[in-house]
Amino acid sequence: MLDQIITSLLETDLYKFSMGQAIYHQFPSYTTTWSFKCRNKDVHFTDEMVEEIKRQLKLYCDLRFNEGELEYLRNIKWIQDSYVDFLRLWQPRFEDFTITTDAECGLDIETKGTWLNTSMYEIPTLAIVNEVFFRMQYDYNDLLDSFKERLDKKFEDVRNNRFNLGTFSEFGLRRRLSRQAQELAVEKFSHLHDGKDENCKSNFIGTSNVYLAKMFGITPVGTMAHEWIMCTGQGNHKHNPAYSNWYALEAWVREYGVLNGIALTDTITTDCFLRDFQLTYATLFSGVRHDSADPIEWGEKMIAHYKELGIDPMTKTLLFSDSLDFEKAANIAAHFAGKAKVAFGIGTYIANDTKVPALNIVMKTTFCNGQDVAKLSDVDGKGMCKNPEYVDYLKRSISWRMDHE
């Protein structure tokens, strides 16, 4: 048996709280189903791993927020007291989980329940699955040594300006090697936080892991995920799913106004997103996030869109978060220098770079209010839906809108 992996309910990505508050205030009755998928074709979870994952999830479901954690959340400017009071009472439910070996990879996980509950399970579940796999499949200490060696080199490359990343943060919780590894990485890069190293041109602004942000006194980072657009746009059976982005943006502005505003563009393709991201939303949101397709083409498209609306792109942030390493990020930063503000959320490369390949695992919303929902993305392979007929319907809805509106 392994030590407990998730030891605090703060140990999740910040956007789970930003979405969670909006769900609590606006969609408390919504229900969702989430499905686990391992995209690695050569990975198999043993029965022993599956049993350990179950045990770790039971331990996670025994956790509660303490007052120090709630006070930390209360001091985030966009979190309201009503939501903090809800979190004081909230607890994960192991009864919402179904965990079996009925999958090609040997592990199948599904969660069903209120969106308020099931949304919160995604990140801790993936973190548990990752750590159990790497600790039980390999010589963990050997992996950790290779991780530390690569981490030291990354840090020196940034500190010595071999790579000029500008503004970047750590996004690796869901695919980290282990809690220990992510903590080592965030602690090391926190020395580059807010200009602590005057000679370093890159600025490490924080981490998506709220627990580690609190631990190291750095900024927790995150706004919204694909689930927000999928559920607000497709969960209401009366909605035309081709307008998912409009429903999502409208609900977000209703909750936050101009606060906490980085919009995710690729849930049902960026071209469709831009039909709804017109002057009001483009002004209210401080920027946009890239998560699929060619980053340079995407960035140029966003800059052209801002200019067409009469908005100076230098007043907006282009946040890149798709499978980045430092070289890719530095090249993107150099390309957009003087064109727009650029920031990076870098995950697996910081939190799980070892001598063996990282897992490519996800948990995605597959149903909302009993109805299929889907993410199409800007590239094939990143979507996930159990009903091909619904995907076809969604594509036809978008196509009709793009051709006739």
Image: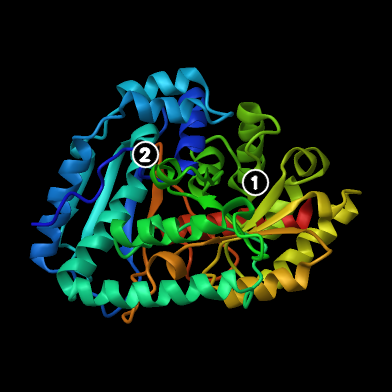
Given residues 62 and 159, the one toward you in this image is: 159
**Nearest to viewer (mark 1 / mark 2):** 2
Q: Position of residue 387 (x, y in %)?
A: 40, 57
Residue highlighted by disc 2: 10
Secondary element under disc 2, as helix, strand or loop, is loop
The amino acid type found where label 2 is placed reads Leu
- Count how many numbered circles sit on residues in the image: 2
Q: Residue sitting at 29 percent across and 75 percent down? A: 145
Q: Position of residue 368 (x, y in %)?
A: 42, 41
- State whether residue 55 appears in this view: yes
Secondary element under disc 1, as helix, strand or loop, is strand
Residue 294 as seen in the image, left or right of residue 148: right
- State whether residue 399 appears in this view: no
The amino acid type found where label 1 is placed reads Ile
Given residues 200 and 290, the one toward you in this image is: 200
**Category of crowding for the residue at label 1, using alpha-carbon neighbours closer than 10 angstroms: few (below 14), some (14–19), many (at least 20):** many
Q: Position of residue 295 (x, y in %)?
A: 66, 69
Quarter of the rendering containing residue 62: top left
**Category of crowding for the residue at label 2, using alpha-carbon neighbours closer than 10 angstroms: few (below 14), some (14–19), many (at least 20):** many
Given residues 340 and 20, the one toward you in this image is: 340
Q: Residue sitting at 47 percent across and 55 percent down? A: 390
Residue 83: mark = none
Q: CA distance from mark 1 to mark 2?
A: 21 Å
Residue highlighted by disc 1: 262
Location of residue 45 with respect to 217 vertically, above or below = below
Given residues 107 and 350, the one toward you in this image is: 350
Image coloring type: rainbow
Mark closest to the chain's N terminus, 1 or 2: 2
**Quadrant into which the N terminus falls:** bottom left
Q: Position of residue 196 (x, y in %)?
A: 59, 54
Location of residue 168 with respect to 162 vertically, above or below = above
